[in-house]
Image: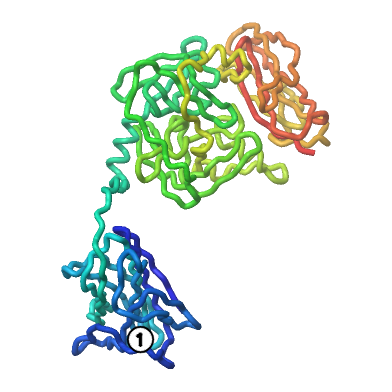
Amino acid sequence: MSVMCRVDKACRVVTFCLAMGLAGGRSAWGQSAGGSTPEGSPFHKLRSISGATGHEDKGRFVMDDARSAFTSGKDTKVIVYFEWEGPLGQHHFEGLWKSPTGKIVLVSDFSYEAKTNHYSGYWTMLLSDGTPSGEWSLEARIDGEAAGFHSFLITGTPVATAPQPATPQPLSAAEMYKTAMGATVIIEKIGENGDVLAKKTGFWIENGEVLTSFGTIDGARSLRVRLSDGTQRETDRILGWNRWQDWAVVSIPRATGLKLKRGPKEPVNVGDRCVFLEWVPAGAKLTDGSITGKNTFQKAGERMLVASGATPESIGGALLNDYGEYVGLISGDVAPGSGSLRILSLINAVGGKVDLAGLDTTGLAVPLSLLPSNLNEVQASTLSEIEKRGEFIPPVVKTQLVSTASLSTYIAKDPNSAIVAREYREIFSRKDQKGSLYVNWWNVKKQKITCEVRLFNLDNRLLVGSQPKEITLNPDKFMATAWDIPVGSMVPGVYRIDLVVGPQVAWREFFRVTE
């Protein structure tokens, strides 16, 4: 049985392999230059040997070219092999490589449970043209006790190497928070009447360019961007967007912040540690965004599942790796306009039931491979131009006029003329032939309203719309309205239904049709 541990440092790789059960038989090699274990140590060094090549054979290590002299630039590595006799049990092994000056340049350690009293191990050091010449040694320790050493000679002239760039170091939690906060902006979605429809986040990727989710701009008339220094800018210019992939780049001319560096091309993997800024009423906090899974959707493309659910205000923020580089974008949509992970439960529902468990504890992120780069200001479009192309979904403007609204396969009227649904439904079968939308109105005051229902697919294409209905509301009279949904003639899929009161969408729901 063997176990290996690998350490990379200063262009040398040290490998420690512990082989158990080698009590029977010994190879024909003699012991090379090296010391025995000191008096009183429970671990007795039986022998040690060095060479440049070796292999394992039936649980034993065989040195192919035993020797004690090596040439840097010609030999690529030095292998040092030990055998010991000692007590059974859990032990901690260390190998200390010492340069000709006596300085310890590398240490490799490993723990293992010995089940026989004979055990062996070997370490490997890679050589380069710059390896110093002279007498080297490897000192073995077991449980802190000296367990022998082995010396060998390296010859060759050290070659000066060009300075290497500093290896990036992971950021501390404090550094990560400072980086994320400095690069993040708050984006308010402004509606037709100047009202704030929603608050999301974004982050600087270039001077004048903020990356955020498409949901941040969807249905907006303008955007109010609050910078990290407290100042505000308004804009309606968008450099680029993708409604299905859920990203948009907002143009904010002559404004900038702390830009985040784009992460490496290699994708993050399940298990990789990431973080993001979660915005809560008390402020922003660093939240665990480690990658817990991945999924791919037909139109939306890949999404990464992250360890924590994101608040609505956190959507559009950066998913950061250990070095403060952005490797993803916190997303809320896999279907444009759905606004939350709830659509996932609708898509994946089995047996006509929607399972909402886990929605608050799981988040989504758009991977780096789908996010844009190299955009140009001359490509900018305005929000109104994007709306005219049919890219936007109108926002829902809440109203007190709608008391209750729901979908069902059956409705009936009670003696007081209220419409009552037999069951609330989000999933219909074509065999149902029809579904129903029922609305109970809140009669605040006597007034006339106009309402209609519009049915869309997820590409925001209007499939059917009802004729407008004019309704008179009276505080002294209960009022309810119902509309039929032709599910029997609909292609299986996910749809959006909007209740429009006057000029605005007052209620919205997504539902699914199956065979």
Q: Within the image, what quadrant is residue 203 found in? A: top left
The residue drawn where x is 45% and y is 27% is 211
Residue that numbered label 1 is attached to: 88
Q: Nearer the viewer, residue 33 or 56?
A: 33
The residue drawn where x is 75% and y is 25% is 413
Say whether residue 303 is visible: yes
**Which amino acid lies under the numbered mark 1 shown in the image of this protein?**
Leu
Q: What colour scheme governs how the chains and residues are painted in the rendered image of this protein? A: rainbow
The residue drawn where x is 52% and y is 43% is 304
Q: Nearer the viewer, residue 67 or 436?
A: 67
User: What element does badge 1 sit on?
Assistant: loop
In the shown orientation, is residue 237 left or right of residue 399?
left
Q: Within the image, what quadrant is residue 295 found in? A: top right
Q: Residue furthest left?
A: 101
Vertical position of residue 246 compared to residue 16: above or below = above
Total of numbered circles in the picture? 1
| Residue 163 in the image, given as x and y percentages of width and height | 26, 48
